[in-house]
Image (cartoon, grey):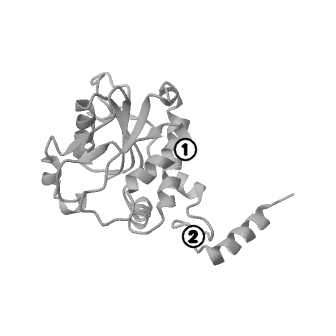
């Protein structure tokens, strides 16, 4: 029996009381269609954080890796902006689940080599003066956690007030102070940093350094999109 018409009817009925729709295709009753999110996957492989070659990198064997899911343009950019400045935190979790599924599909050997009990996902925190109701990186981290089984730990803190990413020039982003982050309660853990967008990579680099100073093994970083 084909249940698709019934499923569509239920979603439309639910939309009357819970008015959400996929921000990509407009399908009512969906915070975001899995197929729409999956279609944004641009990158298939984990890369070396230092040079961008496939991981493991023969040039930087001890360097952390980086994985980005989409390109920060067109649909992926509009989706992220809609998520960040709306009240739909669950959209971020759906985005994270798509990222986690892509990682598991295309990099299963690496992902499966990690002991879930020793790996933690550490999202970049909101700025100290942020008025946003939720942390978008945290929401994405919890979506990834649902798929990969790694725990989420909000271990990072801004050490002092700095301008937000959109308020800083490219030069200012590169000059972000070494001690801009502090970390706690992660000694002996394998850390994967989670962020929404990577531009220069300095924020993630500083976060990894803070975790290393706190006694963690800095494994890599996962981001929704690369600018």
Q: Residue furthest bottom?
A: 16
Q: Quadrant of the N terminus?
A: bottom right
Helix, strand or loop under label 1: helix
Q: Is there a contact, CB below 8 Å, between mark 2 and mark 1?
A: no
Residue 165 rendering spot, x and y as whole percentages: 24, 57
Asked whether the viewer can see residue 135, the reply is yes
Which circle marks residue 155 in the picture?
A: none
Q: Position of residue 144 (x, y in %)?
A: 49, 44
Q: Mark 1 packing: few (<14 Cα in 10 Å), some, or many (20+)?
A: some
- Mark 2 vs mark 1: give the one in front: 1
Q: Nearer the viewer, residue 199 or 195?
A: 195
Residue at left offset 56%, top offset 58% = 36
The image quadrant of residue 47 is top left
Closer to the N terminus: mark 2 or mark 1? 2
Relative placement, left or right, of 93 versus 215 is: right
Q: Residue furthest front?
A: 185
Q: Residue at x 79, y 66 (%)?
A: 6
**Could you say where residue 22 lies in the image, as x and y percent from the top left?**
56, 66
Q: Tell me what residue is drawn at x 22 percent, y 59 percent.
A: 164
- The secondary structure type at the circle numbered 2 is loop
Q: Which label sits on residue 146?
A: 1
Check disc 2: other Cα within 10 Å, few if <14, some if 14-19, many if 20+: some
Q: Looking at the image, is 222 positioned above or below residue 12?
A: above
Query: Please, is residue 149 above or below residue 93 in the view?
Result: above
In the image, residue 164 above or below residue 222: below
Query: Where is residue 133 shown, x and y percent of the image?
Result: 38, 65
Q: Is residue 99 visible?
A: no
The residue under label 2 is 21
Marker count (numbered) = 2
Q: Residue at x 24, y 39 (%)?
A: 205
State the CA–CA distance, disc 2 to disc 1: 22 Å
């Amino acid at each position: 029996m084909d249940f698709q018409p019934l499923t569509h009817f239920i979603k439309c009925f639910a939309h009357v009381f819970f008015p959400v729709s996929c921000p990509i295709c407009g399908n009512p009753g969906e915070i975001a269609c899995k197929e729409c999110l999956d279609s944004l996957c641009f990158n298939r492989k984990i890369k070396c954080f230092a040079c961008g070659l496939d991981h493991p990198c023969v040039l930087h064997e001890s360097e952390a890796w980086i994985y980005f899911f989409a390109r920060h343009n067109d649909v992926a950019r509009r989706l992220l902006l809609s998520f960040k400045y709306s009240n739909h935190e669950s959209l971020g979790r759906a985005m994270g689940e798509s990222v986690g599924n892509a990682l598991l599909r295309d990099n299963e050997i690496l992902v499966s080599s990690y002991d879930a009990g020793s790996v933690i996902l550490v999202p970049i925190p909101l700025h100290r003066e942020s008025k946003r109701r939720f942390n978008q990186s945290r929401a994405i981290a919890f979506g990834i956690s649902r798929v990969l089984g790694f725990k989420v730990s909000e271990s990072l803190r801004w050490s002092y007030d700095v301008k937000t990413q959109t308020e800083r020039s490219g030069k200012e982003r590169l000059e972000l102070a070494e001690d801009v982050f502090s970390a706690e309660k992660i000694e002996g853990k394998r850390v994967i940093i989670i962020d929404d967008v990577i531009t220069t990579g300095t924020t993630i680099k500083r976060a990894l350094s803070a975790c290393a100073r706190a006694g963690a093994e800095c494994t890599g970083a996962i981001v929704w999109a690369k600018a």
